[in-house]
Amino acid sequence: MNDLANILLVDDKQENLVALRAILEPLGQNLILARSGEEALRRLLVHDVTVILLDVQMPELDGFETAGLIRQREKTRAIPIIFLTAISKEEHHVFRGYSAGAVDYLLKPFDPEILRSKVSVFIELHRKNVELQRRAELVRERELAAARRESEHRYRALADAMPQIVWTAGPDGKATYYNRRWYEYTGLEPGPPQGDEWISVVHPDDLQRTLALRRGTLASGEVFEIEYRFRALDGSYRWHLGRAVPLRNNTGEIEFWVGTATEIDAQKRTEQAQDFLLRTGEVLAGSLDYRRTLQSVARLAVPEIADWCAVDLVEGDGSINSLALTHADPAKVTFARELRERYPPNPDVDEGAVRVIRSGKSELVREITDEMLEAAAVDELHLDLIGELGLRSYMCVPLAVRDEVLGAITFVGAESGRRFDENDLRLAEELARRAATAIDNARLYRQAEERAQAARVLAAIGDGVVLLDADGVVRLWNAAAEAITGIRREEVLARRAPDVWPGFANALPRVPVGSSGVPVPADSVPVDAGGRELWLSVSGVEFEGGTVYAFRDLTEERALEQMRQDLVATVSHELRTPLAAIYGSALTLRRTDLELEEAMREKLLEVIAEESSRLADIVNDLLLVSQLDAGKLHVRIEHCDARELVQGVIESARTHLPEGITVRLEEPVGKLEPVAADEDQLRQVIANILDNSIKYSPDGGDVRVTLLPTDRYLRFVIADRGLGIPPAEQARIFEKFYRLDPDMTRGIGGTGLGLYICRELVRRFDGRIWVEPNDGRGSVFFVEIPFAYAGEPVVPPRAPSFSARQR
Ligand code: ADP
């Protein structure tokens, strides 16, 4: 309310208004003039008026009507009105004026003094009102201030009661208030805030980005929101979500900031733990080299979840080996290692990782106390050195899988001030569980690999390996066993040995068997395999699941051995006979007491010459066989005239035909195409067969040689009427050293090499040789040699030439 009173003067006549103003001006108030009732009403809309001087006689709205309207409005109803009139003081007139709300009635012309004093009353009243209002306002303001103080007090009490940290700061960001929780949490001395004390408790790693964000939001006025760590009274850092909003005044300027910091350490750690486990999980799953993997995990753990991380593993011999020791500062690792070397842990004292490995139980020490360090230290110096590491908190978890403790992981909190709690221990245990599983998987994988390798080896080795379980059921049958026996795995696996291979089951009682892990020398036993006699060198080893038999096929070696024995028997006999004849003849010739006739001398010399030639033949045959076996015989394929060749052989045979034997050649009429063969070698083949025909016809008979051209071959047929060959032996007579009558009951000697040589030579000419029984008596030998075609190239020499036996 204004100190000056507004006085509204209403009169339709300008001179009256001028007069009124002149009268009232000395009062020093605010005079508002109006020339009509309407104008008066308009003025009242904009001014607070203290008193109205209202002319009664006005055109349009007269004074009474105007007063009536003023009374109708709430805001103006109480304004005192003094009517001014020139009309006589008639009673009804005056009455009308009062009923219209007049407080006074002045008749024109009026005494200026009276008018002034009447108006003054209202001015005085206005002043009093103004004064009263001012006082009331003052009182209200005081009350308001008290109330504000009260509410601030309440807000602070509320803020103090909150579990969160609450603070306020000025527009410059300096703190103006911290709640009780702040002081409780940080341990800072309560007192009027300096403004920047919070900086000292923010984690150094979080400070830079916090300050940067603060600068930004102070400038922009945007909400400040950040995750940072505050150091607690116990020195540990815990994650908080900080948030501050600006409070603005009417003009929109920032008056102050209200901030809160809510502890989110548990969530944050869970998040970090999940993240950490995820990353270590990737590392653990990434490789089968679990030693390297665990080293990587130890590196990941630092400094994320600990300041130090160590991994100890139990080795195959039971010793405990430090696999990894990590810290963000390599110099510290070196220092710790040196410390450990200088003060090695006492193996008799169960402590640290050793105790955890032995017990399989995790350990957590939230706060490493001086007493603990003293107990661990050997002497003062050691204590000082340990002190340098600044160890504060410790936990150790076993790497356990399937009841076995493979090692332990140790985490230590040091310079970061971190203190481990149950949550950290759970994370460490989870990590250890995953790491142990990874180790276990790697080991299982390696075992499986080794087994697979063993299986591959078993499949690849040349010895037959068969596993029979306690019931004699075949559980393993390797590739060599298949090859040796000709019995496939599918046919024998999961079946009883006597059912699938009775020959082997029958032979088992003669097989030497060693007890678990102790092999015994193998023994050679004959085993029947589907009608075939196999000589196996077998031994067995018993183990919990049954018996493993390993065997080697010696059938061939045995046959060779047999052959060697045959060779010794026949060859020695074959050598002895001519040698005896030569020796006898020579002795006779040397005798002086005997006068030998010339004819006798000739005869003896002839014996020596013939028997020497026989010896040479035997030796030549042996040499030829060894050449054939070694694949070193040189064969020179050329065009041979078979007719001429056969005629030559027969002629030379006829020179010493025994009695009762005749040899006939039945050659085809007309020209014979040449055959492709080594001429000398082919001659030896035909001569050998012809010799045999004569030799094995002790009772004489006709030997017929026939040349029979077929479409691509020339067939040599040599038929005798001699001893014949039983059908079962027809194939075997071509084997090395094989003789039908090894004991020479018929007195017919031989080495058993001739037909073998024949077969081998014919094979080299791409020909064929076989025998059939002759009609009724004797045998027929067939040799087929391909015709040589004109222009066909001659095979070049492959090996040094060997001179075959000639007749
Ligand atoms: P050898 O005659 O030196 O014993 P061979 O290899 O020439 O050796 O012959 C092998 C065996 O075949 C002989 O020992 C003999 O028993 C048999 N044989 C070969 N030719 C005849 C034949 N024409 N008639 C009967 N038996 C024969």
Image (cartoon, helix red, strand yellow):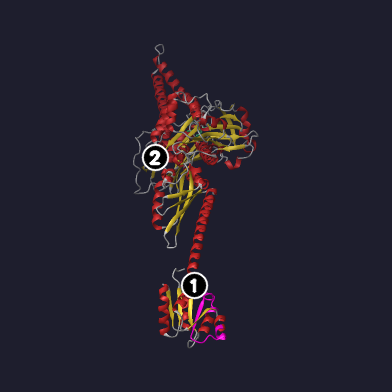
Q: Is residue 672 above or below residue 460?
A: below
Q: Secondary structure at mark 2?
A: helix
Amino acid type shown at disc 1: Val
Camera-nearest residue between 341 and 488: 341
Residue at x-position 42% and y-position 19%: 583
Which residue is farthest top? 593
Neighbour tally class for label 1: few under 14, some 14-19, many 20 plus, Cα within 10 Å: few
Q: Quadrant of the C terminus?
A: top left
Amino acid type shown at disc 2: Leu
> Magenta stretch?
70-94
Neighbour tally class for label 2: few under 14, some 14-19, many 20 plus, Cα within 10 Å: some
Residue 499 in the image, given as x and y percentages of width and height: 65, 38
Looking at marks 1 and 2 on the same chain, the residue that comes earlier in the sequence is marked by 1
Report the disc number at residue 772: none
Does 76 appear in magenta?
A: yes
Does 400 appear in magenta?
A: no
Q: Which residue is mark 2?
A: 645
Residue 356 in the image, given as x and y percentages of width and height: 54, 32
Residue at x-position 52% and y-position 87%: 88
Can I make out residue 444 in this image? Answer: no
Camera-nearest residue between 198 and 349: 198
Residue 695 in the image, given as x and y percentages of width and height: 48, 32
**Quadrant assignment, res 299:** top left
Q: Secondary structure at mark 1?
A: helix
Q: Is residue 747 above or below residue 491?
A: above
Distance (Cα) linking label 1 and label 2: 179 Å
Can I make out residue 780 in this image? Answer: yes
Q: Which residue is mark 1?
A: 121
- Residues at discs 1 and 2 in contact (Cβ within 8 Å): no
Residue 52 in the image, given as x and y percentages of width and height: 48, 78
Residue at x-position 34% and y-position 49%: 791
